[in-house]
Image (cartoon, rainbow, N blue to C red):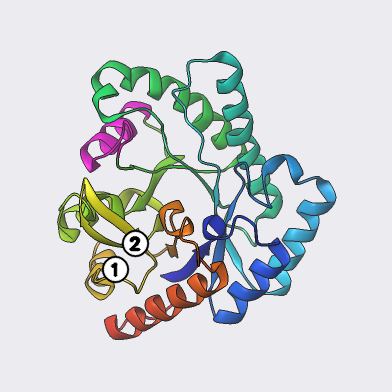
Amino acid sequence: MKIGYSTWGMPTVPIDTAISHIAGLGYDGLELTIIPRFTTELSTLDAAERKRIASLLAQHNLALPAIAAHSSLLETDAEAHAKNMWRLKGGVDLAVELAQGDELPAVNTTPGGKPEDWDRNKDFLAERLGELVDYGASRGVTIAMEPHIGAIIDTPKKVLELLEIVNSPYLKVNFDISHFDIVGMPTEETVAALAPVSAHTHVKDQRGIAPDFEFLIPGEGTFDYVGYLKEMEAHGYDGFITAEVSFMVQAREDYDPLAAATLSYETLSKAFMEAGIKRG
């Protein structure tokens, strides 16, 4: 396994600064965020900028395991849905252009919707997701669906059912264990279910149980990263463990995106050592 950092926690940080800081800390790779209000929003990435970002990643010896293109697949307004699919399919194209080495980045997304929509809308979701997955497959890129608290897919059972319905090797999971930890699901249970079908991960820290919870920067809470890493290894996961800082944390008046990346690295690198897990 390796340690990554998501630029989700750096919406206003220039990509040059982000890459330099992340590499300098010792991370093995980064996840690039391309949604609106970020310095790397997809529409700003012309051919020259894409070439420049690929060069910066290579210069700093950083892998690109994933692209964060989170856009709802359940939008009922035709124009809004078209925009979301443009971003998601554009993320697939970007994954091909920015790939560092032979392994293409996964394109991560959340599904949208609400938990109570599942029985009514799961086939509709699968149809739209199938179109995206087919596009990804045509370019060799995996789509990684993230179960998320408050979304239509909020449990391991639902995401596993979705994988079964779509039935493609190019659909995997972006496994963010924080969304299960805050509802009291045991690490052993969620890892056993999702590690074998995960293309990428997110980790945060968290406190409390939903609905009374808060997301934190890795290292600010009490999440057992050592136990989590051992479980992930035991269930065959060998990809990136990527720290993500939530918008909840970013809303703090004193939020420092570079300091958050530093604390996250210190926390995860220490956990890797204590777990006895060799990186790479």
Is 47 included in the stretch rendered in magenta?
no
Secondary structure at numbered mark 2: loop
**Looking at the rendering, in which quadrant would you find the N terminus?**
bottom left
Q: Where is residue 58 in the image (x, y as percent from the top left)?
A: 71, 69
Q: Residue 268 or 144: which is nearer the viewer?
A: 268
Determine the residue located farthest toward the front in the rendered image.
Answer: 253
Residue in view at x 28 percent, y 64 percent: 232
Q: Residue 147 or 127: which is nearer the viewer?
A: 147
Question: Image height check: is 66 above or below 75?
Answer: below
Q: Which amino acid does label 1 sit on?
A: Glu
| Circles 2 and 1: CB atoms closer than 8 Å | yes
Q: Position of residue 197 (x, y in %)?
A: 33, 48
Is residue 264 at least partly visible in the picture? yes
* Residue 36 location, quadrant: top right
> Badge 1: few (under 14), some or many (20 or more) residues near its Cα, within 10 Å?
some
**Magenta part of the protein: which range?**
150-166
Per the image, the residue denoted by label 1 is: 233
Q: Where is residue 156 in the image (x, y as percent from the top left)?
A: 24, 42
* Residue 181 location, quadrant: bottom left
Question: Image height check: is 79 above or below 164?
Answer: above
Per the image, the residue denoted by label 2 is: 237
